Amino acid sequence: MGKLDRLSIYISMILRHRPQEAHITLDEHGWADVEELLAGVAGTGREIDREMLEEIVATDKKMRYSFNQDKTLIRANQGHSIPVDVELKEQEPPEFLYHGTAAALLEAIRAEGIKPMSRLYVHLSKDGKTALTVGRRHGEPVVLKVHSGEMYGAGCPFYLSENGVWLTKRVAPEYFEEMELQEQESGSVPHT
């Protein structure tokens, strides 16, 4: 893992979970002052400058961050565990979305539904292949097919983050099903 990748992971942790660790504050919409962030990260002994930060934002594969128009403020696009309003606009989701998780968590998920856990929202993918990749991060992966169109029709709001992740507060057990094992193992989870 390269230096910028490690720095990106640290900045993600600061902007989503622990701003106090870099002695910065986030406003109610999750924005941090760029100069304060640079000084705070540098104060932890990490090398960083504006050029490095701009490269991290521009090249991050997961598109985790956004600058405001004049690049004086920065925020994480989603994934916060601290209460911020990233000004998401409600949107109608596709008929199906997907959630990747670990097989070890299935019993609890079947009983209680998909919950945001330490985050503010449940994160859903537009395709099964992405959800499978997410599930692998947590152990033996399982992909759940979420009936998002039906949920939306029942009044459950959905939001689309800046980086294409669908968000909702909770997915009740009646609104998802497990994907077939062979589809998960082959990685060829179908688009629907």
Image (cartoon, helix red, strand yellow):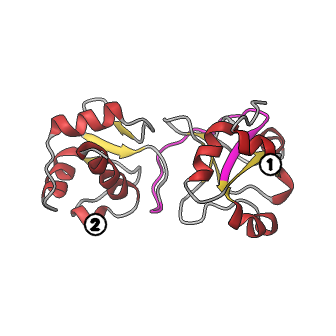
Q: Which residues are magenta?
A: 81-100
Residue type, mark 1 in image: Leu
Expressed as whole percent of the image width and height from the top left, the position of residue 144 reads 75, 49
Q: Nearer the viewer, residue 54 or 86?
A: 54
Expressed as whole percent of the image width and height from the top left, the position of residue 135 reads 62, 52
Question: Is 164 on the left or on the right of 33, as rendered?
Answer: right
Magenta stretch: includes residue 87: yes
Answer yes or no: is residue 27 visible.
no
Which quarter of the figure has residue 132?
Answer: top right
In the picture, the quarter occupied by the C terminus is top right
Q: Residue at x 40, y 56 (%)?
A: 16
Q: Residue at x 17, y 34 (%)?
A: 51
Q: Which residue is mark 2?
A: 20
Question: Is 100 on the left or on the right of 23, as rendered?
Answer: right
Chief secondary structure of the magenta portion: loop
The numbered mark at residue 181 is: 1
The total of numbered circles placed on residues is 2
Magenta stretch: includes residue 187: no
Q: Residues within 10 Å of mark 2 (few under 14, many from 20)?
A: few
Question: Is 14 on the left or on the right of 190, as rendered?
Answer: left
Q: Residues within 10 Å of mark 1 (few under 14, many from 20)?
A: few
Closer to the observer: label 1 or label 2? 1
The earlier-in-sequence mark between 1 and 2 is 2
Badge 1 marks a residue whose secondary structure is helix
Furthest residue to the right? 174
Question: Is 51 on the left or on the right of 129, as rendered?
Answer: left
